[in-house]
C-alpha cells in the first residue's frame, strides 16, 4: 500500500493565509469533507487542491509581509534619525550651557544692567555715549553701584518695553568695560554682542525698571540662553584676552569714584547746613522791591 504524505491543516492555513472555515467550505464544495479542526490532517492531493485555489492569497501574504518589513525598516530608520537629532540638540544645549557657565559662573566679572535710552526724565539717558544723568549722582543706591563698576566687568544695555499690557526687559547689547568711569562720567565699553532682540517678561525675573541693576546668576543665564553660542563664545574669548592683559600689567585699572554731591541740584543731604542761608539769598535775589543792579558779597572772618 502506497504511503501518502499527510500535513496538519493549520500549517496549510498559515501558509496560504486563509481561514479554517474558508478551507473547509471550499473542500466541501469539491465533495471533500474534513473535520473543522486545526489539527485535522490532509493528504497531498487535498493540499494541492487548496494550493491551486488559494495560491493568490499566499502571494498576497508574502507581499503584505514584504510591505510590513519595509514599513518596519522605515520606522527603525526614522527612530534612529530622531534619536540622532535629539542627541545633537542635547549636545548643542550642553555646549551652549557650558559656554554660558564659563562666563556667568567661572569669571570674576561683575554684571550690570543699565538703561541705554529713555525718554523719562527720571531715567538716565544714553550713559555710554553721553555720560550718566544727575539722577545717578543724587541717588545713593545708584551711586554705590556705579562706583563699583571697573575694567573687566560686563555691562548689558537694556530697556523696558510694554506690549499687550505686559512689560518686557529688552536686551540690546552686551559689552566689556575697558576703562572705568572718567571725568566725563562715561565708561569705555567694547560692545562684543550687538544688535540683539532679546525679550524677557518682567514678571518672570522680578522688577528691572531701575536705571542700574545687579542681576542674579539665574537672570543672567536666562538672558544668555537667548544669545547664540557663537556670540557667547566671542564674549568669553574677549574677556579672557582682557583678563590676561590685566594680569600681565598691560592694563591698569583706573578706579574713579564719584562724590554724591551736585552743586546745581536741590536733591541730596545738606552736609554744610547752609539751606537757610541759601534760601535767604534766594529771597533777596528774587525780591521785586530791588532794582538791578544788585551785588552780593560773601565775606569771611
Image: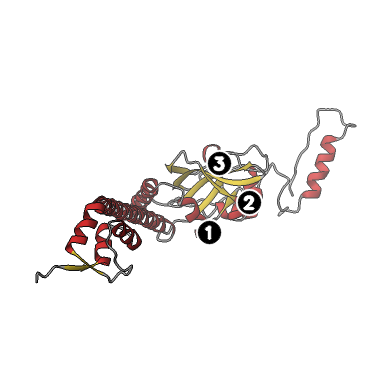
Image point (9%, 69%), residue name: 2
Way the structure is coloured: secondary structure
Image quarter of residue 285: top right
Residue located farthest toward the right when viewing the structure as drawn = 289
Residue holding disc 3: 116
Residue located farthest toward the left when viewing the structure as drawn = 1
- The span from disc 3 to disc 1 (Cα, nearest Å) is 20 Å
Q: Secondary structure at mark 1?
A: loop
Q: Is the residue marked by circle 2 packed among few (<14), some (14-19), or many (20+) residues within 10 Å?
A: some
Residue 161 x/y as whole percent: 61, 42
Residue holding disc 2: 260
Residue 250 x/y as whole percent: 34, 50
- Report whether 253 appears left or right of 158: left
Above or below, 37 relative to 212: below
Q: Nearer the viewer, mark 2 or mark 3?
A: 3
- The span from disc 2 to disc 1 (Cα, nearest Å) is 26 Å
- Whether residue 45 is visible, yes or no, is yes
Between 68 and 2, the one nearer to me in the picture = 2
- Report whether 222 appears left or right of 250: right
Q: Which is more N-terminal, label 1 or label 3?
A: 3
Image point (43%, 43%), residue name: 193
Amino acid at each position: 500500500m502506497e504511503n501518502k504524505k499527510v500535513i496538519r491543516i493549520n500549517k496549510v492555513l498559515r501558509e496560504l493565509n486563509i481561514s479554517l472555515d474558508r478551507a473547509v467550505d471550499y473542500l466541501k464544495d469539491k465533495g471533500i469533507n474534513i473535520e473543522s479542526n486545526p489539527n485535522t490532517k490532509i493528504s497531498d492531493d487535498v493540499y494541492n487542491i487548496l494550493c491551486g485555489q488559494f495560491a493568490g492569497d499566499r502571494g498576497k501574504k508574502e507581499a503584505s509581509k514584504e510591505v510590513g518589513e519595509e514599513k518596519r525598516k522605515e520606522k527603525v530608520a526614522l527612530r534612529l534619525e530622531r534619536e540622532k537629532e535629539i542627541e545633537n540638540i542635547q549636545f548643542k544645549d550642553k555646549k551652549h550651557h557650558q559656554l554660558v557657565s564659563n562666563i556667568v559662573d567661572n569669571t570674576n566679572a561683575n554684571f550690570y544692567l543699565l538703561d541705554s535710552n529713555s525718554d523719562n526724565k527720571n531715567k538716565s539717558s544714553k550713559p555710554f555715549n553721553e555720560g550718566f544723568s544727575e539722577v545717578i549722582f543724587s541717588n545713593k543706591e545708584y551711586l554705590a553701584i556705579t562706583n563699583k563698576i571697573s575694567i573687566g566687568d560686563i555691562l548689558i544695555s537694556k530697556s523696558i518695553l510694554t506690549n499687550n499690557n505686559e512689560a518686557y526687559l529688552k536686551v540690546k547689547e552686551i559689552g566689556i568695560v575697558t576703562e572705568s568711569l572718567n571725568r566725563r562720567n562715561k565708561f569705555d565699553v567694547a560692545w562684543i554682542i550687538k544688535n540683539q532682540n532679546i525679550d524677557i517678561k518682567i514678571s518672570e525675573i522680578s522688577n528691572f525698571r531701575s536705571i542700574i541693576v545687579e542681576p542674579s546668576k539665574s537672570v543672567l543665564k536666562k538672558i544668555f540662553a537667548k544669545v547664540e553660542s557663537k556670540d557667547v563664545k566671542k564674549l568669553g574669548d574677549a574677556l579672557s584676552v582682557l583678563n590676561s592683559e590685566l594680569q600681565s600689567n598691560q592694563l591698569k585699572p583706573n578706579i574713579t569714584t564719584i562724590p554724591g554731591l551736585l552743586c546745581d541740584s536741590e536733591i541730596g543731604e545738606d552736609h554744610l547746613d547752609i539751606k537757610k542761608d541759601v534760601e535767604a539769598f534766594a529771597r533777596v535775589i528774587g525780591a521785586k522791591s530791588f532794582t538791578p543792579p544788585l551785588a552780593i558779597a560773601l565775606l569771611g572772618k
